[in-house]
Amino acid sequence: MFLPFYVGIIMFIDRAKIYVESGRGGSGCVSFRREKFVPKGGPDGGDGGDGGSIIIVANPAMRSLLDFQHKKHFRAKRGEHGRGANCHGKNGADIKIKVPVGTVAYDADTGKMLADITEERHKVVIAKGGRGGKGNARYKSSTRQAPRNWQTGELGESYNIRLELKTIADVGLVGFPNAGKSTFLSRVSSARPKIADYPFTTLQPNLGVIKYRDFSTFAIADIPGLIEGAHKGKGLGHEFLQHIERTRVLLFLIDPNSENPYNDYQILLNELQSFNANLLTKPRIVAISKCDTLVDGLPPALLAQFEEPVSPVSSITGEGIETLLDDLWKYINEQG
C-alpha cells in the first residue's frame, strides 16, 4: 500500500520580542573652497549620509523564531557627517533581519502592524534610517554666495517589536486533545512526534512536509489540540488558532470513542468561527480516527449526522490513509 513520509518535522518558537533602532543621519558640513589665488572660494560643504534602516526579510529556510531568543537588539549604523570639497558622508549600513515566511511584525507599544511577510524574498522596511543633513553648498544662491547654513541629520526610528509566526501550511490538523493527530502523523511519516494517552501531548506546533506519490509535496501543520473556549484563550487557545489562519485546507480528526463525536465536531466549528469566521470558508475534510478500535465499524447513525462526507481512518492499520491523502491533495490543488 502506498504511504508517503515526512521529509522533516520542526518544533518551533512562534513568538518573540525584539528592539530595533535605525541609524541617525549624518550632519551637513560648513566649508568653503580654499585654493591658491582664490581668497573667497564658494561653499563646498557636503551632505551627511543617511542612517541605516532596519529591514525584515523573508528567509524560506527558517521555520521558527528561535533565533530571537538570544539576539533581541538590532541597531543600524548612523550616517557619516559631510565633509569639505563637496564630500558627502557615507550612508549607514542597513540591517536585515531574517524571519520565516508567515511572520507578522507589530509595534508592541501601539499594536500597529508594521510588516506581514507572506512570501519568499518579501522584505519590508520597519524602521527607516534618518535622512542626512544638507551641507552649506546646498544653500548657495545668486544672492547668497557664502552661506553658513547647514542641517543636522534626522533621528532614526525605534520600536519595540512583537513578532508572531502564523504557520503557512497547506493543511491544518484540527481536533480535540487525544484525537489522534500525532499518531496520524507518525503513520504517514518517518517522524516520531510525542504520543501519549493524555491531553496536550503536542505542546508546540509542528510543521512538516509530506512527499506525495513520489512527484510532489505538501506541507501539513500538526498543532496543539483545541478545547471548548479556545477562542477566548482557554487551554492553548490563541497559540493554536493563529496557526491555521493561512492554511488552505482543514482536516478535522474526530475520535469515535468520544461521548458525542458529532457534538465534538460542532464545538470545533464554533471555536473556529468565534476566533475568525473566515476559517469556515476554507475547504474541510472530516476524518473519523481510531477506526481500528470499533468492533462493528462506524455506526450508520453517526455518519448520518455529518453533512460533509466522512472518511474513516486508522493510523494503526493504515485503513483509509491513502484515500484521505488523495482527497487532501485534490483540495490543495483546487485552492492553488
Image (cartoon, rainbow, N blue to C red):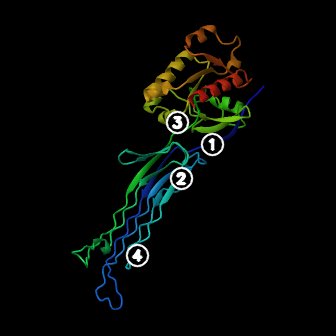
Up-down relation of residue 299 to residue 147 (above or below): above
Of callouts 1 and 3, the N-terminal one? 1
Of callouts 3 and 2, the N-terminal one? 2
Circle nearer the viewer, 2 or 1? 2
Which residue in the structure is indicated by mark 1?
Answer: 10
Would you identify the image quadrant in which residue 87 lies? bottom left
Residue at x 51%, y 39% (from the top left corner): 166
The numbered disc on residue 243 is 3
The numbered disc on residue 98 is 2
Circle 1 packing at 10 Å, graded few (<14), some (14-19), many (20+), is some
Which residue in the structure is indicated by mark 4?
Answer: 87
Of callouts 2 and 4, the N-terminal one? 4
Place of residue 215 in the rendered image (x, y in percent of width and height, measured from the top left): 72, 34
The numbered disc on residue 83 is none
Callouts 1 and 3 close, C-beta under 8 Å = no
Q: Secondary structure at mark 2?
A: strand
Residue type marked 1 = Ile
